[in-house]
Image (cartoon, rainbow, N blue to C red):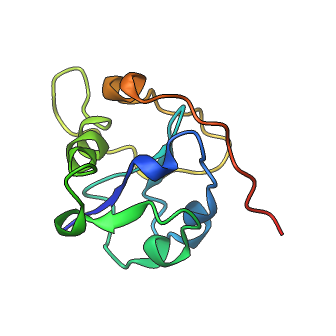
Amino acid sequence: MALVIQSQCIDIKDGICTTSCPVDCIYEGERMFYIHPTECIECGMCESICPVDAIRYDDELDAENAVFARINREVFLNAEGELDEPGGWFRGTSPRADHPELAGYARRKPVSHEA
């Protein structure tokens, strides 16, 4: 099983999940975050802290979000179609290009989750 970030993250990008990840496997994209499928140790810390409930194990995805298992993996494929192993994300790194399928999702106005 792999952890996957679903559609609830699109244009929200709270980012608190990145602070709880012990292996820095959650990467910022232009419109959402993505979990690297082989860097993730499946500890579930990110799932427990996500304020928009966007993170699930791939076998728990509903029909509407099942495509995000593939999207989270494919965003890390290089030009040769092989899985890129970037070695961990850190704040200040340029965002990864979003998966092309995200263009089909309507833009959302970000919601502040601060108290």
Left or right: residue 1 compared with residue 52: left
Residue 4 in the image: x percent, y percent?
32, 58
Q: Quadrant of the C terminus?
A: bottom right
Residue 96 sits above or below residue 53 on the image:
above
Q: Residue at x 40, y 63 (%)?
A: 55
The residue shown at (55%, 64%) is: 17
- Front-most of 63 and 92? 63
Residue 103 or 86: which is nearer the viewer?
103
Residue 111, given in percent of the width and then of the height, sits at 70, 49
Q: Quadrant of residue 109?
A: top right
Q: Position of residue 47 (x, y in %)?
A: 44, 72
Residue visible at 39% across and 29% down?
Answer: 102
Give the mark count. Answer: 0
User: Position of 47 compared to 91: left or right?
Assistant: left
When asked about the image quadrant of residue 105, the answer is top left
Residue under the image location 19 percent in, 53 percent down: 63
Q: Quadrant of residue 103?
A: top left
Compared with 89, 32 (above or below) is above
